[in-house]
Image (cartoon, helix red, strand yellow):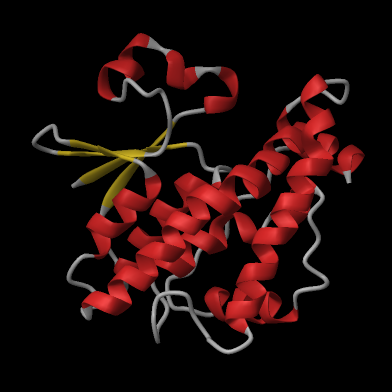
């Protein structure tokens, strides 16, 4: 049995849930609300000193952190990760892109818009984050103009990694209207068997998002 410690509205956490559902793997979900500091409690830090979700814990006590590393471990030996070394490396390159050039802008804009006070000084960062988010989306749009997926020839973990925050980019004021190939790709992902949607923000977060966009 795999135990997942995660915050359901988090895209990084949803990556793990989505792959587990599509693999048909049994797992136990432990909800940890990072928005109110639950990842900073001593019991949590004893398991993951980095104080972040998601992470998984196995029955023998082993712990694995970092969402994309978890995806890679879960997908090994399944159709969600290519066997061919070149195709596997290409998939991993998109996952590194997601963590370095995509998530730091699109996910952070979403967080600031939905989980910080409307007068927070962090909101001064939103124009820059939105600009960089659009730069990442433009790279994805270019790829998708001639490819159906990011994980080689088939849907897999690079698609899951990029889907999680792209599908809610609008929450951070980063609209997708100018990216038809991305919109088509999002629709394809949602049609893959076992798909589950990222939960919507709670009412308080949604109210902040509405004021920010």
Q: Nearer the viewer, residue 56 or 133?
A: 133
Task: Please provide percent x and percent y for residue 55.
Answer: 33, 38
> Which residue lies at the image location 53% right of the left edge and 62% below the top edge?
162
Residue most extreme to the bottom:
146
Image quadrant in which you'd find residue 91: bottom left
Q: Is residue 148 left or right of residue 171?
A: left
Q: Nearer the viewer, residue 180 or 45?
A: 180
Residue most extreme to the left:
60
Image quadrant in which you'd find residue 107: top right
Seen in the picture, residue 106 relative to 192 is either above or below; the reply is above
Q: Is residue 68 visible?
A: yes
> Which residue lies at the image location 15% right of the left edge and 35% below the top edge?
62
> Which residue lies at the image location 73% right of the left edge and 33% below the top edge?
112
Q: Is residue 107 left or right of residue 10?
A: right
> Which residue lies at the image location 20% right of the left edge and 65% below the top edge?
76
Q: Nearer the viewer, residue 36 or 27?
A: 36
Task: Please provide percent x and percent y for residue 57.
Answer: 23, 37
Seen in the picture, residue 33 relative to 44 is either above or below; the reply is below
Q: Is residue 174 left or right of residue 197?
A: right
Task: Please provide percent x and percent y for residue 211.
Answer: 91, 38
Q: Is residue 104 left or right of residue 181?
A: left
């Amino acid at each position: 049995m795999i135990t997942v410690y995660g915050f359901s509205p988090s895209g990084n956490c949803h990556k793990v849930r989505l792959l587990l559902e599509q693999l048909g793997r049994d797992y136990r979900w432990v909800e940890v609300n990072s928005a109110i500091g639950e990842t900073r409690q001593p019991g949590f830090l004893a398991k993951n000193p980095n104080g972040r979700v998601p992470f998984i814990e196995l029955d023998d006590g082993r712990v694995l952190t970092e969402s994309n590393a978890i995806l890679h471990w879960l997908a090994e030996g399944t159709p969600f990760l290519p066997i061919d070394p070149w195709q596997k490396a290409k998939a991993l390159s998109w996952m590194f892109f997601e963590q370095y050039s995509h998530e730091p802008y699109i996910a952070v804009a979403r967080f600031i818009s939905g989980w910080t006070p409307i007068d927070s000084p962090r909101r001064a960062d939103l124009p820059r984050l939105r600009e960089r988010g659009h730069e990442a989306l433009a790279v994805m749009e270019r790829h998708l103009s001639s490819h159906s997926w990011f994980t080689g020839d088939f849907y897999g973990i690079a698609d899951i990694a990029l889907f999680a925050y792209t599908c809610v980019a609008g929450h951070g004021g980063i609209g997708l209207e100018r990216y038809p190939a991305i919109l088509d790709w999002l629709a394809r992902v949602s049609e893959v068997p076992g798909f589950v949607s990222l939960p919507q923000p709670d009412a308080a977060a949604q109210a902040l998002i509405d004021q920010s966009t």
